Image (cartoon, rainbow, N blue to C red):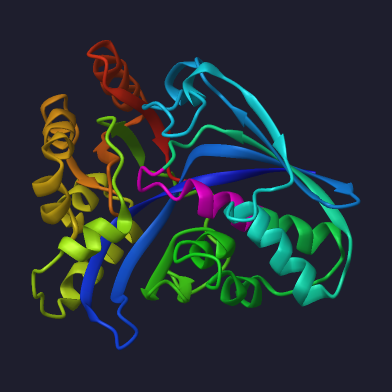
């Protein structure tokens, strides 16, 4: 079984305060995009992880060198069982526990989503494993039940398990479809985006620790974004983009702001940071314009790729 594990961007990300457990209360419009890892699940005696790094494959090459002993931009394959910290492996272990099954699985990840870039790559892989094993093992668990379980793996996992455009709240454990229903009008076109990464690694805990801006509850942010998306108005979406973490992240990593400005200078209607960074994205007028901008930035040695939103 092979599943596309889609990256996500945050059209809005609001930090509403600090919770008693030390985490921050968030509210975010989480939107999946066409850039995706490929997750293959095969029955096995134990849980095994195989990593295929898509190095050197055009715009999908990872934008920085690994902090480990390998250079994932070169395109390598690793096979190991001792990878219990990997979110995909943790997802498989979770599914074993909740199902009571002792079945194993070989998980092959063909990585295209930049690691640590605010695009939810690891969470997308975990979500794909949960949804895939739910089907492979015939568990029949409802998608919302799986999403609730996914909160124990990572904050982005519930939204990516649920799929589609999602309203995420709390520390990520409360999710629902932004339009309130699972079915969507297939006639509605997606939005065209350009992703760009300046090649710096942002630590999510570091960004939240440095975040010190008290912000009021601003319901108009989500309201404006919801209206813009329902209207299919890319220019309105661009005007409604908001990420409360962006000021902190760009203070620590000026390269993020430079990449965001470059997207706008190249012709994007508006640009913002995804998650806690470092990837930024811009809204383009159409697919042709997104492709042109991505090629222009690539020619300047800035990792970039044209994508569209997916349902």
Vertical placement of 219 versus 256: above or below? below
Q: Is residue 119 magenta?
A: yes
Q: Nearer the viewer, residue 189 or 163?
A: 163
Q: Is residue 66 left or right of residue 130?
A: left
Q: How many marks?
A: 0
Image x and y of residue 262, in percent:
14, 28
Residue 231 visible: no
Q: Is residue 175 left or right of residue 137?
A: left
Q: Is residue 129 magenta?
A: no
Vertical placement of 245 versus 270: above or below? below
Residue farthest top in this picture: 299
Vertical placement of 292 versus 308: above or below? above
Image x and y of residue 66, in percent:
44, 30
Q: Nearer the viewer, residue 56 or 168?
A: 56
Residue appearing at x 43%, y 27% in the figure: 62
Characterize the magenta stretch by its predominant secondary structure: helix
Residue appearing at x 28%, y 53% in the figure: 276
Q: Quadrant of residue 253?
A: top left
């Amino acid at each position: 079984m092979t599943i596309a594990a889609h990256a996500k961007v945050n059209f809005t990300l609001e930090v509403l305060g600090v919770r008693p457990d030390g985490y921050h209360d968030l509210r975010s419009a989480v939107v999946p995009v066409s850039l995706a890892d490929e997750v293959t699940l095969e029955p096995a005696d134990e849980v095994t992880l195989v990593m295929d790094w898509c190095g050197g494959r055009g715009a999908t090459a990872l934008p920085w060198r690994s902090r480990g002993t390998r250079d994932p931009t070169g395109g390598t394959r690793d096979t190991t069982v001792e990878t219990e910290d990997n979110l995909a492996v943790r997802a498989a272990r979770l599914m074993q526990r909740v199902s009571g099954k002792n079945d194993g699985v070989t998980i092959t990840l063909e990585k295209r989503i930049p690691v640590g870039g605010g695009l939810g790559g690891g969470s997308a892989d975990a979500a794909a494993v949960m949804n895939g094993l739910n089907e492979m093992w015939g568990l029949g668990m409802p998608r919302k039940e799986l999403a609730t379980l996914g909160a124990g793996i990572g904050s982005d996992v519930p939204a990516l398990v649920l799929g589609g455009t999602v309203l995420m709240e709390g520390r990520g454990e409360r999710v629902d479809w932004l339009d309130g229903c699972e079915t969507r009008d297939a006639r509605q076109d997606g939005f065209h985006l350009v992703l760009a990464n300046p090649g710096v690694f942002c630590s999510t805990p570091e960004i939240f620790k440095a975040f010190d801006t008290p912000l009021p509850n601003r319901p108009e942010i989500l309201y404006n974004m919801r209206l813009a998306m329902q209207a299919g108005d890319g220019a309105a979406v661009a005007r409604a983009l908001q990420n409360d973490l962006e000021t902190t992240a760009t203070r620590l990593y000026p390269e993020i702001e430079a990449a965001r400005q470059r997207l706008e200078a190249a012709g994007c209607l508006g640009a913002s940071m995804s998650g806690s960074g470092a990837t930024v994205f811009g809204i383009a007028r159409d697919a042709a314009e997104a492709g042109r901008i991505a090629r222009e930035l690539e020619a300047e040695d800035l990792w970039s790729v044209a994508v569209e939103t997916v349902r």
